[in-house]
């Protein structure tokens, strides 16, 4: 520690701290423009100059390291004169158009001129004008170059945090201008972080432009609804209408950064696809009815299916309280454990249980990835969890964390990684097994004998890949004192998901035996996937991830709920579809999910859902699944009810209401109560606060939490270790062999997450049309070029989209994002077959000219557009 005195106040700080950081701790205000906490100091604006005893010249506080005994003065006549002169120079060319500038009322230049600026300018020359009109850099970002004060925040944020390098500077000195390549942002992520950090109105949000002033807005702090990263954001509304999203530097681990979906994708709440009234099916058509009529209809239908099997599917985008009450409703009112929260994969609960209980680290991501080494398994962090990518890049560049990648898809993080193992699609389990073998071989005598027996025989080498060998990853892990493993949830799509989870478990057990300090988290692409698991929205697990067959856990819940719970594990969603096909499904209750779009084999899903005796769909939006329903219940959307999400970190955060539910929609909790009452039962408790209290009593990881204690940054759930189960470790799986076939995989793209984001008009302006991504080598062999329209064909069907060549892609891999409804991507896939073998060819010239991208050659069935009697 070193001692520093600032304005006669003395403080001890860590060696390497700057004068500015010390002043902040003392509560002494030193103005800045170019400084941002998460960026290296630039010291270009000269606003933070201070006097240091023994120094002849004023020094920038943001870039001056504290030395022991340093004496600093932050407010003297010379400093005040210097600050005033700097502001006068900035104002010399700054257009004084504050009345029409979107930054008015929250402009840092305005604030500092009020506090430190001159009352009269010494400059009399005409103001410099770069452009007479604002420049539309992208669909969401517009720039007024004349207002720029050259702080370089936007350029550095784009390059050093986001990693996009879409902005740069031209010219020098007073003529310096920030711009994109040829006046556009073609390579931009459209995240808007440059707009957020701009201290003036040089970079602005085009969708928000001229809509409101800061003092007109009612602002609500809440959590992003898109992926599971859990970014804090602030929603601004005016007279109940959504206006904008911004982020605050002082809250959330995202600290002022958001991705394009979080900043620009919340306007989906005002989508025209909202369900306006309850609907029931009459004479083959859905017709709008009152809530009372819908209740009477449901009551009659419940009587007709009495005694038959029931099942439920809920979206992992719903808050914890809704998910908790949903599984309670299914177990105690419908008397079934046929409950699931995933319509894209079958969750291997038996393998996940030991992993979550023994290794899942419920701690801040920033701390978790601060370990010596971080291994990212599967997926594409850049497109699935962009803000997590920002933090990983920062760790790799500034904290010198060893970043290791093992996946089928390349990502932008590969450039910062020490080792990249590119595995075949579905080959993550085999790749992890090869890493384990490499660790065993490298550890040699250091490996305890009992562990060597426990992990089994060597799996053999992975074979040739387009990247580094797994032995390089093994060596990096062995040479690190602390290791973090981040696992993409995309691994669960594969039929080898159980094997992949077991290999992760095996790897972590081996690293623990070698004395490594371990951390492990999933990278979920749904806002509350971990919460859904914690709440027990699973066929074989109760709240708290305790097994349904656990008599003690089941009895505890039965006593608290005053109702019996079935003792046998239920059916996952795939098995529920089989029950539908077999004519054995009575009532199937779907809340907030659209399996017709997301579950593999669209034709089969459509047929199965149509075969259920009673299909109830509770949703905010018109979906393809709604088109098959017997009863449709309009629910509140995100932002129209309060609750909590549990992020990938295990942090429980408040999701706050910022607008009223539209039309005749009701809150999800109220609808679950409504359905229970139709079965002549009551759910208690039924309010959000009361349900949260019950959760914290009955779910061990949430014990001790209170709603008031969550605050704006939330609070962490806790790990609850359970006795190790006798887990059967299957032998390492065979590496998938596609032969000469191309293999199709899917996932999220940067501009969309699931199908909810496709209802955002703003995101649809920045997102490209649907695309097919493949390697340069494969494209050359097929005779297709970037931008061509191609047909992707499987044994199930085909789709047409524009080709996007990625020179980093491995051969044999085809990627199509799952986020475009018009593609009907799941029409190409069969349940249990992932990745999917496909053929790709250029479309006929006539069809290519028509550019009818998107439509898969498959009959969508009773889609919403075809619904007779849909509400206007």
Image: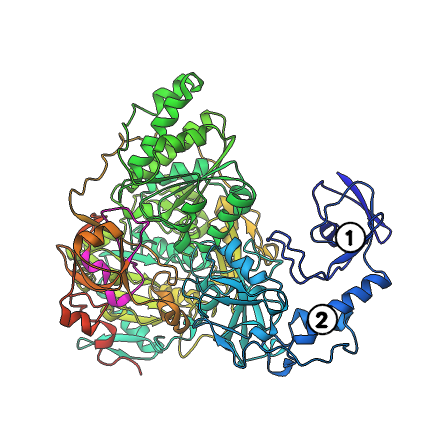
Q: Which mark is residue 89?
A: 2
Residue depicted at 21% across the width and 62% down the height? 609
On screen, residue 287 above or below 301: below
Residue density around tag 1, few if under 14, some if 14–19, many if 20 or more, within 10 Å: some
The residue tagged 1 is 26
Where residue 157 sits, quadrant-wise, is bottom right
Q: Position of residue 634 (x, y in %)?
A: 36, 72
Q: Position of residue 777 (x, y in %)?
A: 24, 50
In-front residue for pair 69/273: 69
Q: Does the rendering let one see residue 725? A: no
**65 to the left or right of 594:** right
Start-end of magenta stretch: 805-828
* SS of the residue under disc 2: helix
C-alpha span from label 2 to label 1: 30 Å
How many numbered dots are placed on residues in this image? 2
Comes first in the chain, label 2 or label 1: 1
Residue density around tag 2, few if under 14, some if 14–19, many if 20 or more, within 10 Å: some
Q: Does the rendering let one see residue 701? A: yes
Residue depicted at 18% across the width and 51% down the height? 781
Q: Are marks 2 and 1 in contact (CB under 8 Å)?
A: no
**508 to the left or right of 24:** left
- In the rendered image, residue 807 lying in the magenta stretch gets the answer yes
- Between tags 2 and 1, which lies in front? 2
Q: Which mark is residue 135?
A: none
* SS of the residue under disc 1: helix
For the C terminus, the image quarter is bottom left
In-front residue for pair 505/58: 58
Where residue 210 sits, quadrant-wise, is bottom right
**540 to the left or right of 62:** left
Q: Position of residue 278 (x, y in %)?
A: 33, 75
């Amino acid at each position: 520690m070193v001692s520093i005195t600032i304005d006669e106040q003395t403080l001890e700080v860590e060696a390497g701290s700057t004068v500015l950081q010390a002043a902040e701790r003392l509560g002494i205000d030193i103005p800045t423009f170019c400084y941002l906490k998460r960026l290296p100091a630039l010291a270009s604006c000269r606003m933070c100059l201070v006097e240091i005893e023994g120094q002849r010249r004023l020094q920038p506080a943001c870039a001056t390291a504290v030395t022991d005994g340093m004496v600093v003065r932050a407010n003297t006549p010379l400093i005040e004169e210097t600050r005033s002169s700097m502001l006068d120079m900035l104002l010399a060319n700054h257009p004084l158009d504050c009345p029409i500038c979107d930054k008015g009322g929250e402009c840092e230049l305005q604030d500092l001129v009020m506090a430190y600026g001159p009352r009269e300018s010494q400059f009399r020359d005409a103001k410099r004008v770069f452009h007479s009109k604002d420049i539309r850099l992208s669909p969401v970002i517009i720039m007024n170059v004349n207002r720029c004060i050259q702080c370089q925040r936007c350029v550095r944020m784009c390059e050093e945090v986001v990693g996009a390098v879409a902005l740069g500077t031209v010219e020098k000195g007073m003529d310096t201008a920030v711009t994109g390549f040829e006046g556009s942002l073609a390579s931009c992520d459209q995240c808007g972080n440059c707009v957020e950090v701009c201290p003036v109105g040089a970079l602005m949000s085009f969708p928000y432009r001229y809509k409101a002033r800061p003092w007109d807005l009612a602002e609500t702090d809440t959590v992003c609804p898109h992926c599971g990263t859990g970014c804090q954001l602030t929603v601004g509304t005016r007279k109940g209408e959504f206006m904008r999203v911004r982020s605050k530097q002082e809250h959330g681990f995202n600290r002022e950064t958001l991705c394009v979906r979080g900043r620009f994708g919340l306007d989906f709440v005002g989508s025209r696809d909202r369900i306006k009234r309850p609907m029931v099916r009459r004479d083959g058509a859905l017709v709008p009815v009152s809530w009372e009529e819908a209740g009477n209809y449901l009551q009659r239908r419940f009587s007709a299916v009495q005694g038959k099997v029931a099942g439920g599917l809920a979206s992992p985008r719903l808050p914890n309280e809704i998910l908790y009450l949903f599984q309670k409703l299914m177990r105690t009112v419908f008397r079934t454990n046929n409950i699931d929260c995933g319509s894209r994969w079958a969750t291997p609960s038996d393998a996940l249980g030991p992993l979550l209980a023994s290794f899942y680290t419920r701690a801040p991501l920033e701390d978790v990835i601060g370990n010596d080494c971080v291994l990212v398994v599967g997926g594409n962090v850049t497109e699935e969890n962009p803000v997590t990518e920002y933090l990983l890049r920062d760790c790799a560049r500034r904290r010198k964390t060893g970043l290791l990648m093992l996946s089928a898809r390349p990502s932008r993080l590969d450039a910062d990684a020490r080792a990249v193992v590119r595995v075949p699609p579905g080959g993550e389990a085999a790749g992890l097994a090869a890493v384990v073998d490499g660790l065993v071989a490298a550890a040699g005598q250091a490996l305890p004998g009992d562990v060597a027996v426990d992990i089994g025989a060597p799996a053999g080498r992975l074979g040739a890949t387009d990247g580094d060998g797994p032995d390089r990853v093994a060596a990096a892990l062995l040479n690190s004192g602390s290791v973090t493993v981040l696992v993409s949830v995309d691994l669960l799509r594969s039929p080898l998901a159980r094997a992949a989870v077991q290999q992760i478990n095996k790897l972590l057990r081996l690293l623990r035996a070698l004395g490594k300090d371990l951390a492990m988290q999933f990278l979920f692409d749904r806002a509350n996937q971990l919460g859904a698991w914690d709440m027990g929205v699973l066929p074989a697990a109760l709240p708290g991830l305790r097994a349904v067959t656990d008599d003690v856990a089941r009895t505890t819940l039965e006593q608290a709920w005053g109702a019996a719970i079935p003792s046998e594990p239920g059916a996952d969603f795939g098995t529920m579809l089989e029950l539908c096909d077999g004519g054995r499904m009575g009532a199937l209750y779907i809340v907030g999910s659209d399996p017709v779009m997301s579950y593999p084999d669209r034709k089969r899903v459509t047929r199965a859902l149509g075969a259920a005796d009673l299909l109830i769909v509770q949703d905010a939006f018109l979906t393809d699944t709604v088109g098959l329903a017997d009863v449709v219940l309009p629910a509140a959307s995100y932002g129209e009810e309060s609750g909590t999400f549990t992020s990938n970190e295990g942090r429980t955060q408040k999701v706050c209401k910022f607008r009223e539910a539209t039309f005749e929609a009701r809150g999800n909790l109220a609808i679950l109560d409504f359905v229970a009452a139709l079965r002549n039962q009551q759910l208690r408790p039924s309010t959000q606060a009361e349900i949260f209290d019950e959760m914290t009593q009955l779910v061990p990881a949430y014990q001790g939490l209170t709603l008031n204690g969550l605050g704006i940054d939330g609070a962490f759930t806790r790990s609850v270790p359970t006795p190790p189960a006798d887990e059967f470790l299957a032998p390492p799986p065979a590496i998938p062999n596609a032969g000469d076939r191309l293999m199709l995989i899917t996932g999220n793209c940067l501009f969309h997450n699931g199908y909810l984001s496709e209802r955002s008009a703003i995101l649809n302006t920045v997102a490209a049309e649907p695309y097919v991504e493949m390697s340069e080598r494969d494209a050359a062999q097929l005779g297709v070029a970037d931008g061509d329209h191609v047909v992707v064909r499987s044994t199930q069907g085909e789709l047409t989209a524009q080709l996007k060549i990625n020179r980093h892609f491995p051969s044999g891999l085809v990627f199509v994002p799952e986020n475009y409804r018009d593609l009907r991507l799941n029409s190409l896939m069969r349940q249990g077959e992932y990745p999917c073998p496909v053929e790709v060819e250029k479309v006929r010239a006539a069809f290519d000219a028509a550019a009818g991208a998107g439509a898969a050659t498959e009959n969508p069935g009773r889609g919403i557009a075809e619904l007779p009697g849909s509400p206007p």
